Amino acid sequence: MALKFDHMTVSNLRVPGRYTDSATKGLQLLIKPSGTKYWLLRFTYENQQKELGLGSYPTITLKVAREMALETRVKINRGENPIETKKLIKTRRSRKKIIAPLFKEFALQCVESKRAEWRNVKHAEQWIYSLTHFAFPVIGNMHIDQIETSHILEILNPIWRTKTETASRLRGRLEWVLASASTQKLRSGMNPAIWKGHLQTALPIPSKIAPVKHHKAMPYKELTSFIGRLKEEDCMSALALEFTILNASRTGEVINGLRSEINEGIWTIPPERMKANKEHRVPLSQRSIELLEIAKIQDLNSRYLFSKNGKSLCNMAMSSLLKRMEVTVTIHGFRSTFRDWISEETDHSSEVAEKALAHAISNQVEAAYRRGDLLVRRRRLMDDWASYCTTGDYGNIIKLSELEAA
């Protein structure tokens, strides 16, 4: 049946059958009993009647169908068979199609690619453990382009409330792996592990069900007594721990510290060992220098600040010492002890304290202006801190109770 097609006519046709566009030679609209509508182009090629599918309506509009029909007619007039051309293009596309790898294979490759940017080897171990233990049993043998939100939730739901921190970190790792696959055109569509506007609608906010736990710290008023006990421990770990406390340092900065980094009473920690990836200079107190000398005498040929037989201390050496001493705080917690002491007992500025702790400045404008490292003021701070750790007093401060007694 020939009709003068327009948008309303094509849209309102419902009866199954073939309808010919009177304005475009050979263009037909096929309506199936199911109601689905398809565009067809009837043409003669080498004295044979043929049909070429142009696509479904309304994906292909009337205007686009007419343009496709006219373009195809031009190709036919050039002697080209549009059906064979379509088959050839389809074959080429299928040959070029990349088979997506299995998730576990691709995820492990991602870990290897990121390994170089991690300063701590434990990061790679944590990634591999969480992926292997929780993700691989569910999606490990699935092709990376087959993974959907339901699979991610199957991984996370069992541990989201009981192992919230682990689950939250795992979600971030899954998001990163799947994003990497999208970048390499191994999958398309939305990332099913993304949090904002997606998984946050299906899972409770981590901080609401598992509040952030801070590193357990020692009250600064107990520190002098603890340092006294620490000096009685005859081991390299005790020297390293006291040095760590005196300089408000992180474990990795100290156990991987080198003697070549010390020059004229200043310890210069290179960027690759700092959390903020920026060089940090530490003015050493007299007690810190004494600790380095004692450590050197005990292991003369070592390159490390604190070592045994030329090898650096293990990551858990100082924590194990605390456990042996039955002190239930963390190494990192001593940084909080240091910060609390500054705030509550001294007139040293917050700016100097933050520089001593090598904290990154989140405000970019402020960071642009605060370029100096306040070394002279930090030296006074670290000398005061060393004095307090050893004697419970510092500088020229006279306690109020002493004035009253006088």
Image (tube, rainbow, N blue to C red):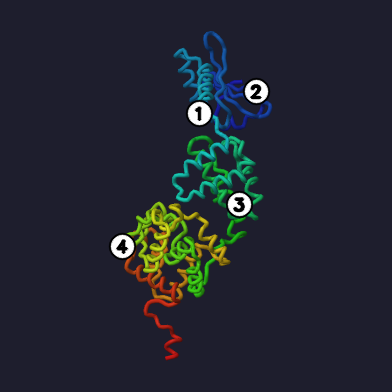
Q: Quadrant of residue 354?
A: bottom left
Q: Nearer the viewer, mark 4 or mark 1?
A: 4
At x 59%, y 52%, the residue is: 166
Mark closer to the chain start, 3 or 2: 2
Cα separation between marks 2 and 1: 21 Å
Residue 202 location (% of width, % of height):
62, 51
Instruction: Give the residue number, with chain letter if any, for mark 4.
Output: 264
Q: Are marks 4 and 1 in contact (CB under 8 Å)?
A: no
Image vertical order of residue 62 relative to residue 346, above or below: above
Residue 65 location (% of width, % of height):
52, 26
The amino acid type of the residue labelled 4 equals Glu
The amino acid type of the residue labelled 1 equals Val
Instruction: Give the residue number, with chain letter if any, for mark 3.
Output: 201
Mark closer to the chain start, 2 or 1: 2
Image vertical order of residue 405 relative to residue 95, above or below: below
Cα separation between marks 2 and 4: 94 Å
The amino acid type of the residue labelled 2 equals Gly
